[in-house]
Image: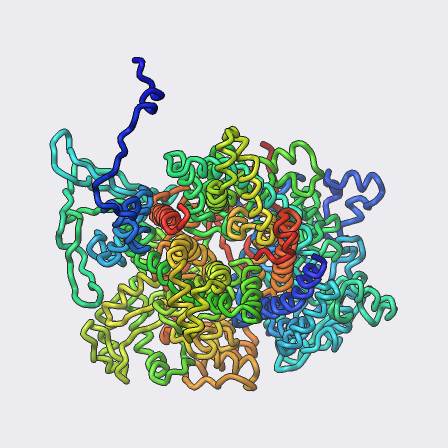
Amino acid sequence: MTDGPGTGAAAAVEHYVSTEPFDPRAIEALSPEQERYYLASQWRLMWWKLKRHRLAVISGGFLLVMYASILVSEVLAPYNLHTRHVDSIYAPPQSIHLFDRGRFVGPFVYGTTYRLNMENLKREYTENTKEVYPLHFFCSGDSYDFWGLTTARLHVVCPAAGGTLFILGTDRLGRDVLSRIIYGARISLTIGLIGITISFVLGMTIGGVAGYYGGWVDMIVQRLIEILQSFPQIPLWMALSAVLPVTWSPILIYFGITVILAMIDWTGLARAVRSKLLALREEEYCMAAQLMGARPGRIIGRHLMPGFMSHLIASATLSIPTMILGETALSFLGIGLRPPITSWGVLLSEAQNINVVALYPWLILPAVPVVLIILAFSFFGDGLRDAADPYK
Amino acid sequence: MKRARALIAAAVVLAWAFVPASAARPAKLLEPFFLDDPVAAGDLPPVRERVPETPSIVTLNGTGQSLGRYGGDLRLLMGKPKDVRMMMVYGYARLVAYNTRLEIVPDILERLDVREGREFTLRLRKGHRWSDGHPFTAEDFRYYWEDVAGNAELSPFGLTKVLLIDGEPPRFEVLDKTTVRYTWSRPNPYFMPALAAAAPLFIYRPAHYLKRFHVRYTDPAMLRRQVRDAGMRNWAVLHASKDRQYRSDSPRLPTLQPWVNTTRPPSERFIFTRNPYYHRIDTAGRQLPYIDRVIISLGSNRMIPAKTGAGDADLQARYLRFDNYTFLKEGEKRNGFTVRLWRTAKGAQKALYPNLNATDPVWRAVLRDVRFRRALSLAIDRHEINQVVYFGLARESANTVLPESPLYRAQYQTAWSQFDVERANALLDDMGLTKRTSDGIRLLPDGRPLNIIVDSAGESTEETDILELIHDSWLKAGIKLYSKPAQREVFRRRIFSGQTVMSVWAGFANGIPGPDMSPEEFAPTTKHQLHWPKWGQYAETGGRAGEPPDMAPARELMRLNTAWRRATSGAERERIWRRILEIHAEQVFTIGIVNGTLQPVVINNRLRNVPAEGVYAWNPGAYFGIYKPDTFWFAGR
Amino acid sequence: MIGYVVHRLLIMIPTLLAISLIVFVIIELPPGDYLESYVAELESQGESVDPKEIEFLRTQYGFDKPAHQRYLHWLVGMVQGDFGYSFEYRLPVSEVVGDRLVLTILISIATILFTWIIAFPIGLYSATHQYSWGDYGLTFIGLVGLATPNFLLALILLYLANVVFGTSIGGLMDPQYLDQPWSLDKVLSVLAHLWIPVVVIGTSGTAAMIRRLRANLLDELQKQYVVTARAKGLPQFRLLIKYPLRMAINFFVADIGSLLPSIISGAELVAIVLSLPTTGPILIAALQSQDMYLAGSFLMFLATLTVVGVLISDLALAALDPRIRLQGGSTR
């Protein structure tokens, strides 16, 4: 090869002119995917980004399922919330078998025999492999009142006639722990959601006002936040819960407690809103809106908030776990929800004694859904936040 | 005169119950090793100079009792700092004290003579000394009477109720250095039980110590300086803060109890050491207590069962609950203790209190109808509750006296307390409460559904569990129960103001009364009574506040209570008691569930002289006090 | 800068006054007062109290005075260094709290060190390996600590420690070492007990710490100077240590404000379960029994610490970060 680039350059080159029509914007032309990407709304972008965070998607799905389940708790739970089994007090979890002595029967549980050990007053249960109770699915069991609409008996799973089905054991009155957990989800899951909504509204309004107006309004709000944050949480909870009127019905108390949790939670959010607004209100588009005579409420709500709404929602998601844990802590102190209301916090505070840890460990199981929900919310919130961040 | 002698016999056994009257002081007294050093160093006189000339001699010849030996530390667990007062309860050295047969006998006193139930002559033991070695004399009684109770600044609200009969104080005389006398113009049956109570009436003070803080005995300038240094408001507050015999947390305050506090609060651990001047000895010449030190560790009370199970206590019942039994049993072998079950002595472990002073006129009328209260009681399945919550070991009973009481009759226990839904329904129908909602809940006369909201202090799952069980059986009688937990103060306020229709609480505090114990709990007497707070307040304030009882049986109870106080013979008192108990059985003012429940008592295997079976009662009983913890001792390993 | 400090100091005065008022309201809000709860508590144990004694105590403690008088009395006392009187302990508040402060601080510092030691490497790793399985796994472990209700974890660990290692239940040392002079055995005993609260309280804080460190680091790692440094071939580890980490540490300093009160009050619920001799359980018990001056003065103390802490952290930030120092403005 003697022909080098040099020789080629030296040779006369034919002047090339493209005959194709000139389009100066060709370089900016977008492929359909790019176009889709650039035209997508902020929310759609978030969704695409979120999808890349595998755990967040899984967590989100899990949360959806959990929240859907509280709509049909009655059907999911094998027993009614209040059904007691005097013969099965502190019964340990029954394991589900498929094969009985090598013969396939489908899912079933063995019967149990109960003996009260008078020596140490222990209720002892032994599996009785002679009795086989196959599980029934979509069957008729304890009757319940479905959302105040109708009385029904349909359950996803119920024990065979004469048998019991305590997948997670029973408590000191012989109530099925699994059913109680399923019913408890109703209170515990919504308390976080309602609470966060309240604290969100509070945080946005107060933070928004402080950030937009600045000056002495900001000064007062700043001090208020500083003061609220300077207290340990628990005394504040205790003081606020003491104000709840004792004449309130359980539902109102439940609502009051969510408000209490929210009252203490909003400060962080308000602070975030405030600092963002302080920066954003100096932007030209805000000035423009002001000159066109928009009212402060509109400027904040229409022009400023959407800019970082996604971010706020993400951080709100992250504080739901605090609320759920807060509920358990309140129950521990005896100032939160109390039986007969059933929430995970109530179940856990009932499990809070040495007897349970040493003798009836299955009563600690309500901690499992608490941990799972909090994990799910945390991962989901992390994913949301990463997705909402315009820099990544 | 004959009547007087009967009274003495009834109220006081003059000689020490365990001892023949002639038992003399043993010739030789044995010095506790614990005190060898101070005695050798001359800081403490030898034992024969320390015990009174006529000590109280305890014979240990009951079943399982034995003479002990000196030494050892008794470890107790308590929850709050003020629980240290339990040492005053467990120690149970009183002027006069209950013995295990619940008779009142002299203890710190050498003897107590009673004339006509109104003149009490107290004779102290010669040579008896406070724990700091200062003589315990009539001066200590005079100081209380004149300078504490009689001082307008220290006692601005006058004498305590027990010392006033019809508003009249006693005449107090010092007869000689070791004899004092209290005389009322009418009998005072409350006096001796108050002296023997678990939380006793202290009619004496360590005068030599307290005079330092009393304006009458101390230079005002110096006192002012002390008040200022302590950051107190005035000398009375300072004096009151030093004068806390019951609380027993001050290491400086001299005492007559078997053990003396040596730890200055605040602390996590209080160490009580033996009182070198204690007045009881055993027949072998050992000065009691046998155990040298009692060590109280404070910690969160919900962890006490766990700590006890881990072997951190030698004698523990406080903060242990019946449902801890199984757990405690598991630790027995590993940690060298035994769990015993003692009977409790409350009239009912839990009882429902219909509020007869409820403000709602419809409810009030319904609750005051005896048929309603009877129906509620009949519609409770006590057997099921007993099985579920108490393993069937409790006694299904109305809220009344226990079989351990000499006043017990089966009919008090069983009246209206047998589960009988049919009869309950019949009673309710008879009242005219026949209309029902579609769910089968009866309607009140004004058309509201019969939803009874039961307030609870909600501290234990026991209460909520029992209420849940009652809920189910009441449904069968067409009554719906809602339970409503509230904090203790709120709970009391609501009841007192009449907002509460019904509440749940423990039954009568003393379920084992004898005829000579006051029946005041059974009649309207204080505003703390949950079924008739307003009537109680009326009686308590002498009519200045509250409402006069307007139900005939309640008025009769009040009359009977007064009659009991005026009664002069034991037989008359017993008759009055019986009438009171009958009224309660028939009227079902309170609805007892079960009584005689069991209290786990954890006892170190080396600890001797603790009875295997006992009654765990506050008053009379002082929990362990009545079993004389000063005679408990540790055997070798 | 001096003007800024003076301004911040002046603004503390109305803030503290407002806090004192809120504290007073907090302790007055629950219905009833100490004596009522005292009577109710004794009654619940079967003891009765002579109403005359209660009346005497009522006047002694000044409960018969109107609320504003009590507030002023308390406020004036505090300014003079008199924190009032604890009814429950029947001792001056300063004596009740004093002893426990040392142990509380010990536990808190151990916990914070534990948290940092765990959180730092995990945070670093997570930020540099975003979305890797390692990132997921480690965050997961951190979050499990956050998600488990502390009081339950404490109880379980306590029981297991007793059954497996024979550690005595609750407290900070075996009982025989209480009130004893410090010795090697005592130190060992304290260490044997200390790990449970440290782990329990620590794990709950770790997750938050990891998350914040990770987020801050991620922000820094995007910056131009990091890209430049990387382009110039700086080794990965040195690159990380040199600037981004230092920047990320700023938020630890900013944390001092909220850290101080938690050092003092400790984790109340865990301390209750573990019977720790710290101040947290005292505070809760005081609030529950409405021992108002103990609760009030203690809350006031904590709030003051926070306010001072925020000030310190602002000043420290200003000192650490030249940008803030030169602008001389608030960082918040």
Q: Is residue B230 visible?
A: yes
Q: Position of residue A7 (x, y in %)?
A: 33, 20
Direction top: furthest residue = A1
Q: How many marks?
A: 0
Q: Nearer the viewer, residue A264 or B584?
A: A264
Structure colour scheme: rainbow
Direction front: furthest residue = A12
Q: Is residue B92 visible?
A: no
Q: Position of residue A21 (x, y in %)?
A: 22, 45
Left or right: B18, with C123 as reference point: right
* Residue at x-position 59% and y-position 72%: B189
* Residue at x-position 80% and y-position 42%: B38
Q: Height in image: A268 above or below B312?
A: below
Left or right: B314, with C160 as reference point: right
Q: Quadrant of the N terminus of chain A?
A: top left
Q: Quadrant of the C terminus of chain A?
A: top left
Q: Height in image: B201 above or below C266?
A: below
Rendered image quadrant of residue B516: bottom right
Rendered image quadrant of residue B348: bottom left
Q: Height in image: C211 above or below B498?
A: above
* Residue at x-position 21% and y-position 79%: B434
Q: Position of residue B596 (x, y in %)?
A: 42, 57
Q: Height in image: A6 above or below A84?
A: above
Q: Position of residue B595 (x, y in %)?
A: 40, 60
Q: Nearer the viewer, residue A93 or A299?
A: A299
Q: Nearer the viewer, residue B147 or B136?
A: B147
Q: Nearer the viewer, residue B427 or C271?
A: C271
